[in-house]
Image: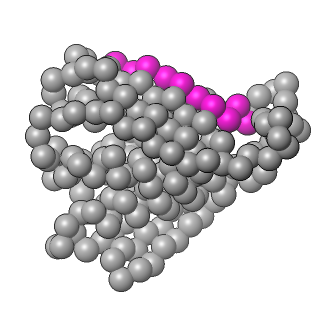
């Protein structure tokens, strides 16, 4: 089983994260930001990655450290669980509608981190979550998973629907990327012989 446990303790955040890439989408998530926790629930369910995550942070200052560090820890945990990455599909793509909203995510676990994020929102908050931190969350994942991730919101009016479409779409694209290719179980998906 491809599993990893990561713990991060700083003066700003305390985060414990366990992932199982070969799970069934079971989750046990606790953060001090209700809407963010809900999006992480959706991520686990739609990626089929089992996720246990507890995040505490200095939200009395603001939410930035908690959201960004959660992305950092989650990215590291997925990368560690991938091990040598032999036999994975490496790349994934998905288009996800959520009522009137439509999101597209393409990603490549290439060893070269990059985030392209093209999404506009109407409000500054959704529930308790500062919406501008969504991009920071995915940037932290990209940097620590060492993945090239492009997220584009093609349409939508309701911010809840837009954000949910993005998280579900990312989950489905990642599910495809980390899945094993039965034809290449002992092969690294790179002509260079490494992902870097």
Furthest residue in direction left, as rendered: 123
Residue in front for this viewpoint, 89 or 190: 190
The stretch drawn in magenta includes residue 64: no
Question: Which quadrant would residue 176 be assigned to in this image?
Answer: top right
Image position, residue 13 (x, y; %): 36, 74
Residue 85 in the figure: left or right of residue 101: right
Compared to residue 189, the image places residue 63 above or below, namely below
Instruction: Count the labels in the image.
Output: 0
Image position, residue 137 (x, y; %): 37, 52
Image position, residue 98 (x, y; %): 29, 21
Q: Tell me which residue sits at (37%, 60%) in the image.
A: 68
Magenta span: chief secondary structure:
strand
Q: Tell me which residue sits at (36%, 24%) in the image.
A: 103
Q: Which residues are magenta?
A: 87-97
Question: Which quadrant would residue 33 be assigned to in this image?
Answer: bottom left
Q: Tell me which residue sits at (30%, 71%) in the image.
A: 57
Residue 138 in the figure: left or right of residue 143: left
Residue 89 in the figure: left or right of residue 94: right
The stretch drawn in magenta includes residue 95: yes
Image position, residue 22 (x, y; %): 65, 42
Residue 47 can be seen in this image: no
Residue 113 can be seen in this image: yes
| Colour theme | one colour
Q: Tell me which residue sits at (19%, 52%) in the image.
A: 130
Furthest residue in direction bottom, as rendered: 11
Compared to residue 156, the image places residue 138 above or below, namely below
Residue in front for this viewpoint, 24 or 93: 93
Residue in front for this viewpoint, 78 or 34: 78
Compared to residue 178, the image places residue 105 above or below, namely above
């Amino acid at each position: 089983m491809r599993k990893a446990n990561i713990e991060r303790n700083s003066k700003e955040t305390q985060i414990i994260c366990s992932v199982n890439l070969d799970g069934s989408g079971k989750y046990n998530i606790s953060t001090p930001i209700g809407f963010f926790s809900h999006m992480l629930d959706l991520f686990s369910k739609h990626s089929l990655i089992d996720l246990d995550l507890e995040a505490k942070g200095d939200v009395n200052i603001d939410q930035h450290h908690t959201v960004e560090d959660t992305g950092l820890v989650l990215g590291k945990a997925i990368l560690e669980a991938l091990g040598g990455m032999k036999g994975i599909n490496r790349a994934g793509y998905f288009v996800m509608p959520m009522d009137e909203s439509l999101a597209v995510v393409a990603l490549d676990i290439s060893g070269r981190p990059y985030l392209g994020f093209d999404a506009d929102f109407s409000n500054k908050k959704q529930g308790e979550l500062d919406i501008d931190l969504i991009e920071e969350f995915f940037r932290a994942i990209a940097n620590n998973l060492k993945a090239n991730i492009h997220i584009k919101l093609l349409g939508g009016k309701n911010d809840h629907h837009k954000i949910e479409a993005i998280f579900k779409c990312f989950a489905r694209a990642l599910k495809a990327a980390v899945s094993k290719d039965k034809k290449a179980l002992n092969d690294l998906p790179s002509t260079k012989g490494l992902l870097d």
